[in-house]
Image (tube, rainbow, N blue to C red):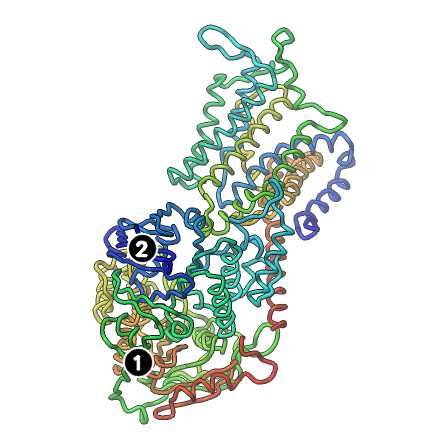
Amino acid sequence: MTLLKGRTFIVLIVLVIFFSFASKSFLSATTLTMVAKHVALYGILALGMTFVIITGGIDLSVGSVVGLTGMLAGGLIQEGLTIGGKTIYFSVPLIILFMMIFGCLIGLINGLIVTKLNVAPFIATLGTMYICRGFANLRSGGTTFSSIAGYEGLGNTGFKMLGSVIAGIPTGVYVFAVLAVIGAILLKKVPFGWYVLAVGGNEKSARLSGIKADKIKILVYIISGFCAAWVGMINTAQLSAAHPASGDGWEMNAIAATVLGGTSMAGGSGTIIGTIVGAFVIGVINDGMTMCGVSEFWQKVIRGCVIILAVVIDQTQRNLQAKMALQARNENK
Amino acid sequence: MFDDPNVVLHCEKIDKIYPGTKALDQVSFDLLKGKVNVLIGENGAGKSTLMKMIAGIEQPSAGKMYMDGEEVFFKDTNAARAKGIGIIHQELSLFPNMTVYQNIFIGHEKKNGFFLNDREHRKGSDVILKRLEHEIAADTMVGDLRVGQQQMVEIARNLIQDDLRVLIMDEPTSSLSAAEVKVLFKIMRELLEQGISIVYISHRLEEIMEIGDHVTVLRDGKYVADADIKDIELSWIVKNMVGKNTQYHRFERTIDLDHAEKVLEMKDICLPKQGGGYLLDHVNMYLKKGEVLGIYGLLGAGRSELFECLMGMHPEHTGEVIFEGKPIKISSISSQISKGFALVPEDRQRQGLIQTLDICKNASIASMSKFRKGPFLNKKAEESAVDDEIRDIHIKVADKNLPILSLSGGNQQKVVIAKGLLTNPTVFLMDEPSRGIDIGAKTEVFEIIHEFSERGLSIIVISSELKEIMAIADRIYVLSNGKCTAELSGDEITEDGLVRASYAGLGTGASAEA
């Protein structure tokens, strides 16, 4: 029912119907698999972004973290880690673990800059965005790691699993589903979720209620970094190569998906289910337009219009509801 | 070290130093067990600061606190809460974006293992709100509630603590209706019976006499006196608060109002209410030149709405407004200001000031167009005009380029008044000009009103305080439920008459609580 309350869900349905008429191959298994692959990537980023935006922050670094974790993972597989003349190759599960930790670390840095150094989230994550992108290029000197299949003899094969399809569904979608469920539990079912809402709704009150606001803020950036690391790995596996420019501009897709999903940029409100719908809208517009042969340039124009329109519709709806609630209250008196 | 079974918490020579000011100076305070401990003092006397120490929100610069004979130190609110100390803040500290039950239980969540037990939360919320006689659905968003209801939620938050020993209430009644205050007092008495000790801060002296057991007076961060309420009278409190015995004295008028011309006349003003009925119901009024006109009424009687109509905030109102002999059409706020209307709004922080601007800009912002040299701002003209105004109404400022929030509430209010006066108004509208400022500043505001009316400015003042409005107004209209129910002047103005008229519009169907 929450879905039906969100106008974005209706936008999604309209888009799907429109594209299925506009392009005959849109509803085919191949296309849907492709859409799902992309939705998973934006969606996972948007999950982390949702937590950050609910607290009133923003994380612009996620796109660059995607690029950097991709490069680090690709590099570890292709070249291993050379310390003191000795080269070590890690197994894939270890590499995944390292990347998860690395993503959290970037998040921790973002969080510390925002809370302890008191830098506005926009600026702090803008800085780490450039830094991470720079390191992604520095890792390889700007070239691509293209042997990410691993070597049988070194025992580091299997990374491409993350980019493959299991039982007809891309692996990324499973990861998205698992992370979404965890995200929903975090936001709705444990005290942490209340604290996130509270910090975004009224930070001063949150502190007065004994909530460690700084800790909560640091944690949401860690969640965002964690999600970005997963996207970096999945994307690299899907492309079978790690490229330093990967994920460029994806933070905007993630923000768009989050906002389309009803999360307020002012902080204090947002849902995981909304963000999932938002990610689908972004994915469907992007791939749908490509399928229809819309030029890349027009795609951007149309995407921008849809984002604004969807949010305007959503707000109008909410204002209307608020007015009706007020009226009902007056009549009850 | 310190052990007295009748004292639940003892503060010993507490100092609190903020950069530039000493908010508390060697204050000792006994919090009596099972009693309503009233703290009283003017704004800035240090009441809230002392309570912040006890609730662990801030820490003393020097001095000690004892509970149960042991020294305690609260490094944060959690530490104070662990000792059973809860606080209801002066400003609501709720989360408008969260539900009623989330607000009540945040920080004290009930869990099944790792997970929130929302069923328990909803049940608990229903039980506690029923006890407060406010059955608000647990899933309602707090932002959708009336302020009075929000205050009840704030109170409920503290009551769910099982181990509550001390409850600090910092001006809990400022946004409650009379009926809600009654419920609050009932709850307070229940809490006392359970052995909970209460600290009660309020500016409403009548309330203190009704509910209080023991009163402690602070002035300028220092302890002044304390006494049992049963042994004292109101005048004792006032005398200790202000240090001198002030009573509002009626100002003598030198202007002959009988022969003054009417500067403003309102005929049949109506403002429809959303969802039927009227906020203003065929109101007729006039204002003479140099007159101080009072408007009295209960909360929600339509007083502020009347001002809002005159200032152009409700272009949808009907009726005729005659200004200086000519009928005018009220279309926008800026056109009303240029015609000569100025408003001192009710909510100083939200409507009166721009917190991010300095004192000078706050005063001049409404009359910027006057301080121009071609397209540029004439800084010199602006500053000298502001300086004149600061001198004229005696605003105490060290430097007019300081942040507005560096001023005390009373001086902030005077800046808002200066802003209005700088527009050179013919009609000056003041909505609760003495709200939230101390008695000293109140008297000064009244003097400003008197002085400017003597100079020929026509002023309309809204006030909820009987004594105030009786002291300053030449003539009083009473509004009740959107209707004008009385017009009193001279000797006709009595407390009894005003109060009766303020209820007169509440006929059948309308509740007194609205």
Which residue is located at x 63 percent, y 72 percent? Answer: A331
Position of residue A224 relative to residue B253, above or below, is: above
In the image, residue B401 lies at what x, y percent?
25, 56
Query: Disc 1 marks which amino acid?
Result: Leu
Report the side of A82 relative to B16 (left or right).
right
Report the side of B472 relative to B92 (left or right).
left
Position of residue A3 relative to residue A86, above or below, is: below
| Label 2 SS | strand
Report the side of B438 relative to A57 (left or right).
left
Q: For this rendering, which residue is in front, A158 or A149?
A: A158
State how far apart marks 2 and 1 are (Cα): 50 Å
> Could you say which disc has been placed on residue B272 in the image?
none
Which residue is located at x 56 percent, y 77 percent? Answer: B272
In the image, residue A65 lies at what x, y percent?
52, 29
Q: For this rendering, which residue is in front, A240 or A177?
A: A177
Query: Disc 2 marks which amino acid?
Result: Cys
Mark 1 chain: B
Mark 2 neighbour class, 10 Å CA radius: few under 14, some 14 to 19, many 20 or more: many
> Could you say which disc has been placed on residue B11 in the image?
2
In the image, residue B438 lies at what x, y percent?
31, 69
Q: For this rendering, which residue is in front, B6 or A222?
A: B6
| Label 1 SS | loop
Find disc 1 in the rendering and name its residue: B457
> The C terminus of chain B is located in which quarter?
bottom right
Q: Are marks 2 and 1 in contact (CB under 8 Å)?
A: no
